[in-house]
Each structure stands twice: as structure tokens, then as C-alpha cells.
Image (cartoon, rainbow, N blue to C red):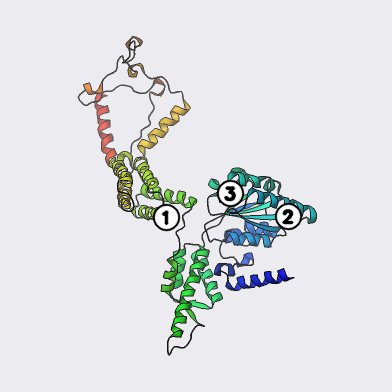
Amino acid sequence: MSADLFTSTAEEILTSRGPLADRLRPRTLDEVVGQTHLIGPGKPLRALVETDRLSSVILWGPPGTGKTTIARLLASDSKKVFVPLSAVTATVKDIRETAMAAQRRLGENGRGTIMFLDEIHRFTKSQQDALLPSVETGLVVLIGATTENPYFEVNAPLLSRSTLLRLEPLEPADMAELAKRGLELEGATAVDGALEHLVDSCSGDGRSLLTSLEVAIALARAREQHRSDLPDRESNLGSITVSLSDVETAMGTTAIRYGRDDHYDVVSAFIKSIRGSDPDAALHWLARMLEAGEDARFIARRIVIAASEDIGLADSNALVVAEAAARAIEFVGLPEARINLAHAVVYLALAPKSNAAYMGLERAVADVRNGPVGEVPPHLRDAHYKGAKSLGHGKGYQYPHDHPDGWVAQRYLPDALANATYYKPSVNGDEAELVDQWVKRRQRDA
């Protein structure tokens, strides 16, 4: 009885004094803000819960989108027992003990078990393998939560036995609703523009919004307390108003989100912006990577690749500029080398584009892999070693430099591929002029 009393008292204290995000945690799926594509009426996750047919799921989404909240609500709406574990602290022993308890529970009273594993991407391969038997037999319904791309972080066997559900960043309207609920709970209001700035700055992260809002409210409350302590001032603590300055100060401690999933998505957007000749977008993604602490050498490598993959012969100087920027990372170092990276990025974005050389290689590789490719023509074979000429090596070979234009018509491909065409030039930038000269030489000698 005493333990129950203390537990109840502790819960009351946490409810009144805990973080705003915890005090606002929804009690039903209907109270959840956002993710209507999963938990709205008739949507997949809600249907599974309402029919008590919930199977193992992986909830994948950015921080602050409701993964933990939804997991707890799924358990509360189910007849199964909820067992929360954190991948940060849980061990293989903990998993096995949970599985044994689930076996006993199922045998004794027929109740199933839901295991909630937060930050499942932190589990090693062996730890994830330990989950497989229980998940495979259905002894345990696994709800895993991760901010990282499961295809990179979760073992394929475990992923194949789970339903992958993607949670999206909260929409601005959802974020505004969260802020409104937080203000009401704290008995506060906000000036025009303060909440808009808060919503815009938190980029769909509900937890970040509530944490920053709580700090902003504390700042506003402290300001009102200070004013009330001044002479000839009446206390106005019953009406706390959050200002734009309060929000800006509170947001000063908000970290940039950049997990492994963001790493791949952002660099993809970066390369595609260069390829699409949009310098503004390319600079945006460059800034995002640099501010998030991305390895500058990785960025430089991607720029060098893009110089040949996407610009190529349309402007061969792009490769020179990109390589120079890459060397600047080592020679100059950060933060100044950011300037060199920006130089290269804008140059590549503005440059004419051609992937003809790259695509030509891909066609040639396809022929080489699919075969047959034929032998090296005799006139192209090495004729420098003793006995080579007696084998016919080099016979009939014409030295291009013996001709006025440094070019002579002769066959260089194997017989089996005599008519193959791999290089299909573009008409962009410098490539058009290079190809024009090449075609004229071939036509004249023909």
C-alpha cells in the first residue's frame, strides 16, 4: 500500500512538473496531432489496432513526429501487455528475459506481449538476431522506433517480418495546434509572429517545438516576475505573454537534425540540384551539409564525381575546378575551404551539362559483361617483344602522328563489335565544338 501511495504521488508530481512534451502526451489516438495517413479513420495502423490484429511494425520517422507516443497508444488500445525497452541500454539478456516472460504470460492467462524498442537502429546485428525467434513466431509483437533509414540499420530478416510505417514531419498546421495546446496548458499567450517563427524554425519536429516553447514561456514568466518586483508595479503573473524575442532566445539551443538518412537524402538533393543547373538550391544543400558537420572531404568527392558525371565534355574545366576545391580542403582547411566548395558548386551548377562520356562507358560495360567481345585486332596488338612480328602483331597499324591532322581512319574495335557505338555526344557547351571537329575529320578521310 505504501509503495502504491509513493508511486501515485510521484506520478502526480511528474504530471504537474514534468516536461511540457510529456504533460501534453495524447491519451488516445484521436488526440495525436498529425500522421493521419497512418492513424486516421480507416487508415492501416488504426484498422490493425481496432481489430486487435496488430503485428510487428517499425515506425520510421524524424525526431518529434510521435513514434513513442503512437507506440504507447497502440499498446493501450490493445489487450496485450506493453514492455518498453531502449536499444541504448537493453542487452541480449534483456530480450531473452522478455521473451521468457511473454511465454509464461501467454501460457498462464493467454495475454500477448508488445515489446517497444526505442532507437532500434542502435541495436547490433547480434542483438537484432536475438529478436527474430520471438517475432517470427508471433510470441512478441515488436514495435521498433527509429529516426534512421531501416534499410540501412535494421537486419533484413527482422525488417521482412515487420511492417514498415513511415512517419512524416508534422505539417505547419499540426505544429501550430501543438503550440496552442502548450500555451493553454501553461496559461500563456503569444504575440503575433512568435508562434509562426517557432513553427517555421522547428521543421516539423513536435518535441523540439514544445521544448522551445517551454523555455520561451519560462523566459516570459521570469520577465513578468522581474517586472512585478519593481517598485510601483502590480503583479501580472496570471497573464504570461510570449514575445518573439523569447522564442528567438529559446530557439538558440535547438540542434540541427542530420541523421544517416538525412546524409543520403541531402547529398542526393545536392547532386540533383547541380545536375539541374540550380545554383541557389545547390548552395542551400551545401550549407545544410556544412552546418550539420558533414565531412567536407565527402562533399568534395561528390563534387568531383559530378564534374565528370553531369558536366563532362560540355565543360572539361569543371573537373579542374572541382579537383582544386577538393585539394583546398587539405591545403586551406575549414572554415575557409567552404568558400572554395561554394565556388566549385556554383561553377558546376552554371556549367552546360553532358553525361555522354559516362553513358558511353555504361554501354561499353554492358557489352563487355554480356559478351562475346572478340579478340584484340592483330594490328593493335603489342609488337615490341621478340617474335611478336612473326605472329602478325602490329602488322598494318598506321601511326596517327604520321598524318597531317594527327588522325587516320582505321579500325580499333574487335571484329565482334566492329559496328558498336557507345559515345553519343550532346550538343551542349564545348562538347559540340569538339564533336564537330571530330566528325569533319572522319568525313574528310572517308
The numbered mark at residue 123 is 3
Q: In x, y percent, where is residue 359?
A: 39, 36
Label 2 sits on residue: 112
What separation in Å lies between label 2 and label 1 (alpha carbons)?
43 Å
Task: Report crowding for label 3: few under 14, some 14 to 19, many 20 or more residues within 10 A (C-alpha).
Answer: many
Query: Could you tell which of marks 2 and 3 lies nearer the N-terminus?
Result: 2
Is residue 237 visible from the viewing direction of this image? yes
Q: Nearer the viewer, residue 180 or 9?
A: 9
| Residue at screen point 75% across, 56% down | 111
The N terminus sits in image quarter = bottom right
Q: Locate residue 50: give its quadrant.
A: bottom right
Query: Could you tell which of marks 2 and 1 lies nearer the N-terminus?
Result: 2
What separation in Å lies between label 3 and label 1 (alpha carbons)?
24 Å
Q: Which residue is at the far bottom?
A: 232
Q: Is residue 399 above or below residue 293?
A: above
Q: In x, y percent, where is residue 204?
A: 49, 62
Q: Which residue is at the far right?
A: 108
Q: Is residue 423 above or below residue 66?
A: above
What amino acid is at disc 2?
A: Gly
The numbered mark at residue 260 is none
Label 1 sits on residue: 292
Q: Nearer the viewer, residue 299 or 236?
A: 236
> Cβ–Cβ below 8 Å for labels 3 and 1?
no
What separation in Å lies between label 2 and label 3 (alpha carbons)?
23 Å
Foreground tag (2 vs 1): 1
Is residue 24 visible from the viewing direction of this image? no
What amino acid is at disc 1?
A: Ala
Q: In x, y percent, where is residue 438?
A: 27, 31
| Residue at screen point 36% across, 46% down | 300
Q: Nearer the viewer, residue 200 or 436?
A: 200
What amino acid is at disc 3?
A: Phe
